[in-house]
Image (tube, rainbow, N blue to C red):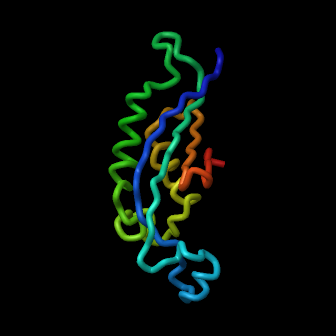
Amino acid sequence: MPKVTVHRKAHFNAAHRLYRKDWSDEKNFEVFNKCSNPHFHGHNYELIVSLTGEIDQETGYVFDLGILKNHIKVEIEDAFDHKNLNIEVPEFKDLNPTAENICVVTYKKLRNLLPENLDLEVTLYETPRNFVSYSGE
């Protein structure tokens, strides 16, 4: 059977501050620059969730994108959109909400809801030119 990759795009807006609680403000600024602003800053995140697997002979789908859309809405958009990630999202209480960490958290939240036979990759755009991908490795 041929393997095909299907993709679903999503979007959310969120604020965050990149910093370590155990570092001084000066050290945080040295490492994270203006992203360590104690008053936070925001991004218009673009998310692409990709599933790779064999085409189901009965449905013609790799996976029903309507179901994937709902998983993304509930687990990611509802949880992250218009939130301060550092303060309002439990996963980032003690985890620096970098694009890398947001991507891994997103992957973990979705991986538990999807069939194991499908490969999952999450790509997160923090800006149009800065983006990260994670596929569970």
Residue drawn at (53%, 32%), measured in percent from left and top? 7
Question: Number of numbered discs present?
Answer: 0
Outermost residue toward the front? 128
Residue at image location 46% in from the left, 13% down from the top: 59
Q: Is residue 104 among the parts visible in the rendering? A: no
Q: Residue at x 45, y 69 (%)?
A: 41
Q: Is residue 14 left or right of residue 99?
A: left
In the picture, the quarter occupied by the N terminus is top right
Image coords of residue 25 (percent x, y):
54, 87
Residue 89 percent across, percent down from the top left: 38, 63
Name above or below for residue 17 compared with residue 81: below
Q: Relative to 13, does residue 60 appear above or below in the rendering?
A: above
Q: How far from the left and from the top, in percent, is residue 90?
A: 38, 64
Residue 111 appearing in the image: yes
Q: Is residue 108 left or right of residue 83?
A: right
- Can you tell which quarter of the image residue 70 is in? top left
- Of 77 and 44, the residue lying toward us: 44
Residue at horizontal 64 percent and vertical 82 percent from the top:
30
- Left or right, 64 with respect to 34, comes to left
Residue 119 drawn above or below residue 46: above
Q: Nearer the viewer, residue 129 or 105?
A: 129
